[in-house]
Structures are given as C-alpha cells and as structure tokens.
Image (cartoon, rainbow, N blue to C red):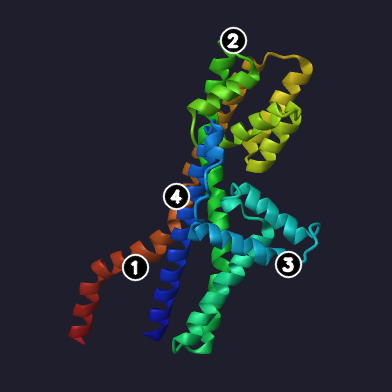
Amino acid sequence: MIFVVSVIVFVSVSTAAYAGYRLWQQRQIVKERFSLYRESAEEDQEQPETPAAGSRFKQGLTKLASLLVVKEQKPRWQKLRRQLLLAGEPGKLKPQEFIVLKLVISALTCIIGFILPIPLSQVALLLAFSWLVPDLYLQQRIRKRQQDITLAIPDILDLLTVSVEAGLGFDAAVARVVDKAEGPLAEELGRMLYEMRIGRPRRDALRDLSERTGVGYLQNFAAAVIQADQLGVSISKVLRIQSQDIRRQRRQKAEEEAMKAPIKMLLPLVGLVFPSLFIILLGPSILHFMSAF
C-alpha cells in the first residue's frame, strides 16, 4: 500500500511539473509570435513583465547547468545534443540543462521517498524510474515528431510542386508552404528558409534540414534538390518525382506491415485466445470426468 501511495505521489509531482513546463512553453511561443509583429518603438520601451514560474525554473536550470564542466566533444554529449535536435529542441534545452533537469527530478523523488515511510529498495526503484522518465519522454517525442514529418512530406511536396509550376521560385514556394502548412515539417522549412535568407547556401540549408529531422525521405529529397540545382534540372519535375516515390515507398511499407500482422498476432492468439477457448470447450468435459471418478 505504501508503495502504491508513493507511485501515485511521484506521478502527481511529475504531471504537475510537466504541466508547468507546457504552460511555460506555450507562453514562450506566444511571446515569440508577438515579438515578430511588434513594430512600434513604444512597445519596445514597455516595462518587462514579471517572469512566470516556468521562466524562473528555466533560469534556474541555466544557472545550475553553467556549473557543469563538460567536454563538448565527448560522444555521449554529442548523442544527447543530437537527440534534443531530433526532438525539436523542447524548451530550448541544452544538453547540460537536460541533465540538470533529470537530476532535479531524481532529487525530488528521493526527497519524497525519504519523507514517506518507504523501504530503501522501493526508493531505489523509484529513483531509477525517475532518472529514466526524461529519456523515455525524449524518445517518444522523437518518434512522434518523425512520424508527423513522414506523414506530411507528400502533401508538402505536392504544394511545393504546384507553387513551382505556377511560376514561383523555390524560395518563394517554400515561403508559401510555410504560410499555408502547419506542423513540425513546416517549422523546419521555415527555419531552412530563414537560413537561406541570411546568406546560407541552399545546399547547406537542405543538408541541415535532413540532419535536424533524421527522416530518410527528407534526406532523399534534399539530395535530389541539391543535384537538380547543380545540374540545372527542372525542380518541379524533381519535386513531383520525389512525391510519387515517397507515396510508393509508404504504400510498400504499409503492405509489408500488413504481411507481418499475422505473425505478430500469433503470440497473443496462442497465449490468450486458445487457453480461453480450451477452457470453454473442454472445461465441462473435464469436470464431468472428474465427478465420475
């Protein structure tokens, strides 16, 4: 019973912390959008608002992360930075701040475990679980983001193709897609467009786009556009071919998953359905046989 109460307390604290983080993130998004449309100088001279609790929490993470002395070239830090990049940089967290966040969650869990009358073995289990929760959340966010990008690629490419065939240049077509579309892919295209506008070569911006997402379809798309730009091939034809090819690959993957379904259903069928069926069919006969002897 004590272990159940401790698990409930841990889940409640984690949920409250996540809700506070989401509120702070939404507040930051609103502030960024407002700053884009702020034009008058009077608004720039307004008194700054009192920082929210989420902002103060982020500032505290930054201060604690500054105390960490790490070597940026170590593989584990590069891997963590890569994971944060693939996840869309949630909360603009740096690798050091992410580690500090894990330490804070673990410390809170440890304090709760010592306050409540919980055995040390269960405290150690909760501590290990709290240390792994941010990593699990990060992995789940990466999978969700890549899935959203994969589903949006064909429609985005169709819109790019129509815009280019209508007479727009590639940069103008990307800008139109960014204005019309929503989602992580549109955000990444907007970031790529910003990099090209500040002077970054198109090929480098496209390569960075594929690296930030980690989606194989976008890597093929970036390579095809770079090659078409170098060889002088019509970009509209390349975009249409890429859109058709991505849809064909997705259809083949769906057919492959459908063919794997019977094999995946075999284990629950044998372990769950067949025993219940045997009990229903053979149970009365076995009881009658036992009563006879």
First reached walking from the N terminus: tag 3 or tag 2: 3
Q: Which residue is mark 1?
A: 275
Vertical position of residue 104 compared to residue 192: above or below: below
How far is disc 2 from disc 4 in space, using C-alphas?
A: 49 Å
Q: Which labelled disc corresponds to residue 113?
A: none
Tell me the quarter of the picture where residue 267 sits: bottom left
**Residue under the point 66% across and 42% down:** 212
Q: Kindly state the secondary structure of the residue where label 4 is placed.
A: helix
**Nearer the viewer's eye, disc 1 or disc 3?**
3
Q: Kindly state the secondary structure of the residue where label 2 is placed.
A: loop
Query: Label 3 crowding class (10 Å Cα cut-off): few <14, some 14-19, many 20+?
Result: few
Q: Which labelled disc corresponds to residue 262?
A: 4
Vertical position of residue 91 compared to residue 131: above or below: above
Q: Is residue 45 left or right of residue 288?
A: right
First reached walking from the N terminus: tag 4 or tag 1: 4
- Amino acid tagged 2: Gly
- Amino acid tagged 4: Pro
Q: How many marks?
A: 4
**Nearer the viewer's eye, disc 1 or disc 2?**
2
First reached walking from the N terminus: tag 1 or tag 3: 3
Judging depth in this view, the residue of 57 and 280 nearest the camera is: 57
**Are the residues tagged 1 and 2 within 8 Å (C-beta)?**
no
Position in image of residue 144 (x %, y %): 51, 48
Q: Which residue is mark 3?
A: 68
How far is disc 1 from disc 2 in space, using C-alphas?
A: 65 Å
Q: Which labelled disc corresponds to residue 167?
A: 2
**Residue under the point 49% across and 61% down:** 53
How far is disc 4 from disc 1 in space, using C-alphas?
A: 19 Å
Pick the quarter of the image with the N terminus. bottom left
Vertical position of residue 11 compared to residue 110: above or below: above
Q: Kindly state the secondary structure of the residue where label 3 is placed.
A: loop
Position in image of residue 4 (x %, y %): 39, 79
